[in-house]
Amino acid sequence: MAFTIKIYEKNGYIYTLLQKRLSSFFPDAYIVDPYLEPDDLDDRFSSYTKVIYDPADMNEEQAFSHTTSPIRLTEDGGAIDCARLIHLLRTPMETPTIPGTVKGTLSAVIPFVYTDVRDRFICELSDSFRGADINIRLDFTSKLRALWKGSSGCNMTSLLEACRSKRFTPEDILKYCNMDDLGFLTPGSCTNYDDVYDLGAGRSVTLMNLAAELVHSKTRSVNVLAVIEGFRTKDLPELLCGCDMVYILLPSKTASEDPGAQDLISMLKKILGPERITVYYAAGPNETSDEENIGQREIAV
C-alpha cells in the first residue's frame, strides 16, 4: 500500500538520514520534504499521509494544521528514536505478510585478505542482494578490521550485549543499525577493539541465530551478510550453521594448498555440506573445480 511520509525538518543532513533510514522499512512510501516540495503531488498516488515534525521548527498547533495525528520527531530529551518513528508509522497498517517463500539469505564471508580487498569483494557480492527489502551487514571482527569506525557507528558491542536478553527479537537487530556507503544497514564496529571476542563466541552465535530467524521469517525479504574473522576453528561450525552460503576468501590459489586452509575447507564442507561452501581467490582468475567448489570470477587486488 503506497502512502506518503512528510518530514518537516529544516536541517538537510538530518532529513537525508531519516529519508534513507525510513525508505529501508517503507520502500513503497513517498518520502517528501514539504519545505522543498510544497505542491503535494505525491498525495494523488497515496492512500494516506503521515506527518513527522521537528518541535524545534514547528509547534504542535502548526503540526495539527497539516494532519490530525502528527508525529513528533524527537522525544522530550531531544533524541531521535527511529524505532519509535517506525512503530508509529506502521500503526495504521497491518504487518505485511509475503506469501510463499521469502528469498532472504544469511551469508558469511571468512576473509584471509586485507580489509580493502575484503570490502571490494563484498561490494561486488552486494549486487546479488538487490531486490530485498533490507540488507544488513554484521562485522564479527576487531574494531581495527571493521568497515565503519565512526563515533556514530559503534553499536556492535551494544547489539551483542542486548541480544542475550530473552525479550530481544530478531527484528530488534534493526534498532542498532545505520546505513553505510554500500547500502547495508549495519551496527558498524564494536566500541572497544576486541569486544566481539571478549564477550565470547557464544554471544556471536546467539546473534547469528537471531539473524537466521530474521532472514527466514515470512514478514519481509531480508538479507544478512556476516563478516567472520578471528574465531577459533572449533567455533566456526556453530557460528555458521544457520548460513545459507559461506564464502571463504583467500589471497591466491596457492593459499588453498596450505594444509591449514585445506583442513578448514574440508571441515566446513563435511559439517555444513559442500553446496554451502564457496572459495574465492583475490589474486588472479579463479578456476572451476568440483573438488574445491571454486567460483568463476576474478577480483583484482
Image: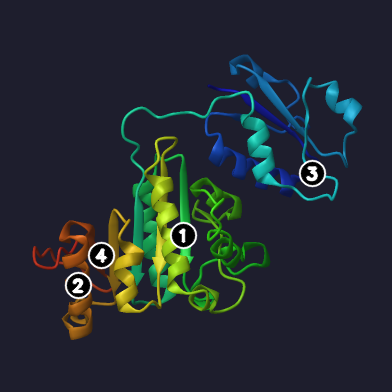
Depicted 53 relative to depicted 232: above or below: above
Depicted 141 relative to depicted 177: above or below: below
Q: Earlier in the sequence, mark 1 or mark 2?
A: 1
Instruction: Check the image and name the residue furthest to the left.
Output: 290
Q: Report which residue position mark 4 lands on.
A: 298
Q: Report which residue position mark 3 lands on.
A: 74
> Looking at the image, which residue is at 33% across and 40% down?
103
> Looking at the image, which residue is at 45% across and 48% down?
135
Depth check, mark 3 against mark 2: the one in front is 2
Amino acid on which disc 2 is placed: Met
Instruction: Measure how far apart labels 3 and 2 are at the Cα level.
Output: 51 Å
Rendering colour mode: rainbow
Q: Earlier in the sequence, mark 1 or mark 3?
A: 3
Q: Quadrant of residue 10?
A: top right
Q: Secondary structure at mark 3?
A: loop
Density class for disc 1 (Cα within 10 Å; few <14, some 14-19, many ≥20) is many
Depicted 290 relative to depicted 218: above or below: below
Foreground pick, 295 / 41:
295
Density class for disc 2 (Cα within 10 Å; few <14, some 14-19, many ≥20) is some
Q: Secondary structure at mark 1?
A: helix
Name the mark on residue 267: 2
